[in-house]
Image: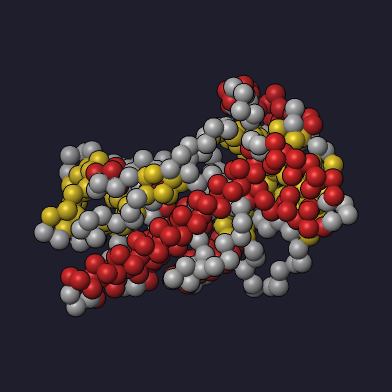
């Protein structure tokens, strides 16, 4: 939908082809964290959209980090000036999708529902998408944003490359107690003593809490998963009533993979989002890199259609593919850093954690490192298009 809005902002027609039904219910909260950079990008292609998304979200200003139950870092950010985008806002993805869909309809985007795409092929400058329903669609350019199992990517001869992690993570969303709400703080526990030294992350978002439990390598994640499994450990780390407010539970073993190319040999198919890359969620690098993927893909297509030669058209697409793949590789490297830190697989790293936690009360930099390391390094250098993610 972001790609379609970006195309409409450039005056181009756009059609979203969706496998599911228009009225289907999407499970869970999924991607809940939208960075300020993403809000500003959405605001640029559709004035008012970024601010509206922010109005539905929740912004936490305080973060705390604990080691074996003892607080080792605490920071509260200043309040955001009126009318200025916050550092980030947190809301359920279903709300983000609803607002994007409404905006797409206002912008004149066409939607085709109940049409799973099973393959893509290119001939004579046109992409043909074959649907499971038996029909087909044709276009000069296709932006494949059809997820990590993308049939468009696979049949276009492209592939995701990268390893899968060994540690499982259980993610629980539970509704806030509106009568006795918890403080709006992001809290991270290294080795939470109430759950046998497993790491636990708490992130508030509008009306809910996201709780991530990192399983030990020897754990059977099924014991901690599902509503019944979550109820065995959630009351140990939150007020007991939150176990009766569970809205969604999911278990993940993350893959750290990037497509070998973000465009096919014909330069007619462009990959975005999880069709192009999948990361562990630490640092919220998935959705927040998918948004610039989509906007830059639309810009590349616009330049290609305006070009004076096939060479110029291909160069525009190649520029998109190279810059966004470089961004994805940086995101994967940052996410890998976070995963190595969280899994603490070596004695050296476990020793570093213990020493940093010990000295954090006296050396603030040690506490800052413990707080920031699980999310990977800050990506301070923008890519060639001026976008960090």
Q: Residue furthest front?
A: 348
Q: Position of residue 325 (x, y in %)?
A: 40, 58
**Total numbered labels:** 0
Q: Residue at x 66, y 56 (%)?
A: 58
Q: Is residue 115 visible?
A: no
Q: Position of residue 36 (x, y in %)?
A: 59, 64
Looking at the image, which is closer to me, 185 or 258?
Answer: 258
Looking at the image, which is closer to me, 46 or 317?
Answer: 317
Q: Residue at x 78, y 53 (%)?
A: 366
Left-right relation of 95 to 18? right
Q: Is residue 68 visible?
A: yes
Residue 155 falls in which quadrant of the image? top left
Q: Position of residue 326 (x, y in %)?
A: 43, 60
Q: Quadrant of the N terminus?
A: bottom left
Looking at the image, what colour scheme do you see?
secondary structure
Q: Residue furthest left?
A: 124
Q: Residue furthest bottom?
A: 308
Looking at the image, which is closer to me, 310 or 126?
Answer: 310
In the image, residue 181 above or below residue 108? above
Q: Position of residue 202 (x, y in %)?
A: 70, 43
Left-right relation of 284 to 137? right
Q: Residue at x 48, y 37 (%)?
A: 164
In the image, residue 283 above or below residue 38? above
Q: Residue at x 71, y 73 (%)?
A: 81
Residue 19 falls in which quadrant of the image? top left
């Amino acid at each position: 939908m972001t790609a379609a809005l970006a195309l409409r902002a450039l005056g181009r027609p756009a059609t979203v082809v969706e496998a599911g039904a228009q009225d289907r219910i999407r499970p869970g909260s999924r991607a809940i964290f939208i960075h300020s950079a993403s809000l500003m990008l959405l605001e640029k292609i559709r004035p008012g959209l970024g601010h509206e998304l922010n109005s539905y979200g929740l912004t936490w200003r305080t973060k705390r980090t604990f080691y074996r139950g003892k607080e080792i870092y605490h920071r509260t950010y200043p309040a955001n000036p009126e009318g200025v985008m916050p550092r980030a806002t947190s809301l359920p993805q279903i709300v983000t999708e609803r607002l994007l869909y409404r905006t797409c309809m206002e912008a004149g985007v066409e939607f085709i529902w109940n049409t799973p795409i099973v393959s893509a092929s290119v001939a004579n400058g046109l992409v043909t998408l074959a649907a499971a329903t038996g029909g087909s669609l044709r276009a000069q350019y296709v932006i494949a944003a059809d997820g990590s199992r993308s049939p468009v990517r696979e049949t276009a001869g492209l592939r995701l490359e990268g390893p899968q992690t060994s540690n499982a993570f259980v993610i629980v969303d539970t509704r806030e107690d509106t009568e006795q709400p918890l403080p709006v703080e992001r809290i991270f526990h290294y080795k939470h003593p109430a759950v046998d030294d497993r790491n636990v992350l708490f992130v508030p978002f509008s009306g809910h809490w996201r709780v991530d439990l990192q399983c030990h390598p020897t754990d059977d994640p099924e014991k901690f998963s599902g509503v019944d499994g979550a109820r065995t450990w959630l009351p140990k780390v939150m007020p007991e009533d939150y176990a009766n407010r569970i809205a969604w539970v999911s278990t993940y073993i993350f893959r750290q993979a990037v497509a070998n190319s973000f465009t096919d040999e014909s330069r007619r198919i462009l990959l975005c989002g999880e069709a192009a890359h999948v990361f562990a969620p630490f640092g919220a690098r998935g959705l927040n890199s998918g948004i610039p993927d989509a906007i830059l893909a639309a810009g590349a297509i616009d330049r290609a259609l305006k070009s004076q030669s096939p060479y110029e058209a291909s160069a525009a697409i190649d520029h998109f593919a190279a810059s966004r793949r470089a961004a994805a590789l940086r995101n994967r490297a940052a996410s890998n850093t976070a995963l190595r830190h969280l899994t603490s697989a070596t004695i050296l790293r476990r020793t570093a954690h213990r020493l940093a936690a010990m000295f954090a009360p006296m050396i603030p930099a040690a506490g800052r490192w413990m707080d920031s390391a699980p999310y990977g390094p800050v990506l301070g250098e923008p890519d060639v298009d001026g976008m960090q993610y």
